[in-house]
């Protein structure tokens, strides 16, 4: 089983009126979890894992193009 720490830029919505000085350059997010699946495009991590049943809960799907830093350890 692998565990990942990921720093990435998420998409976001600013719903109020804003001027140019209020525009976001980045929306950084820190995520950590059990690695469920990894492809060329995406990494999926889970908050909870049941290794005996091979089930996961609290899935987060992160596009690799948005990842700034990633550390994966085998546990």
Image (cartoon, helix red, strand yellow):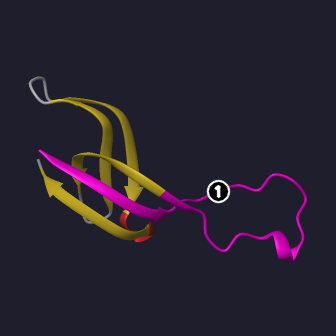
Range shown magenta:
1-29
Is 28 inside the magenta-drawn segment? yes
Residue 23 position, x and y percent, is 77, 71
Q: Nearer the viewer, residue 47 or 11?
A: 47
Which residue is at 71% across, 55% downward?
13
Q: Nearer the viewer, residue 66 or 34?
A: 34
Which residue is at 36% across, 66% downward?
64
Left or right side of 27 for 17:
right
Residue 5 position, x and y percent, is 32, 57
Q: Quadrant of residue 10?
A: bottom right
Left or right side of 54 for 58:
right
Looking at the rendering, in which quadrant would you find the N terminus?
Answer: top left
Q: Is residue 46 above or below residue 4?
A: above
Which residue is at 51% across, 58% downward?
29
Residue 42 position, x and y percent, is 33, 58
Q: Is residue 68 above or below residue 44?
A: below
Q: Residues within 10 Å of mark 1 (few under 14, many from 20)?
A: few
Q: Quadrant of residue 50?
A: top left
Q: Which residue is mark 1?
A: 12
Is 52 inside the magenta-drawn segment? no
Residue 16 position, x and y percent, is 87, 53
Left or right side of 58 for 20:
right
Which residue is at 32% across, 64% downward?
41
Q: Quadrant of residue 62?
A: bottom left
């Amino acid at each position: 089983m692998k565990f990942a720490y990921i720093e990435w830029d998420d998409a976001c919505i600013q719903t109020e009126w804003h001027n140019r000085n209020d525009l976001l350059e980045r929306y950084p997010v820190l995520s950590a979890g059990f690695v469920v699946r990894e492809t060329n495009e995406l990494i999926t991590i889970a908050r909870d894992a049941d290794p005996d049943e091979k089930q996961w809960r609290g899935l987060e799907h992160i596009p690799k193009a948005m990842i700034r830093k990633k550390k994966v350890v085998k546990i």
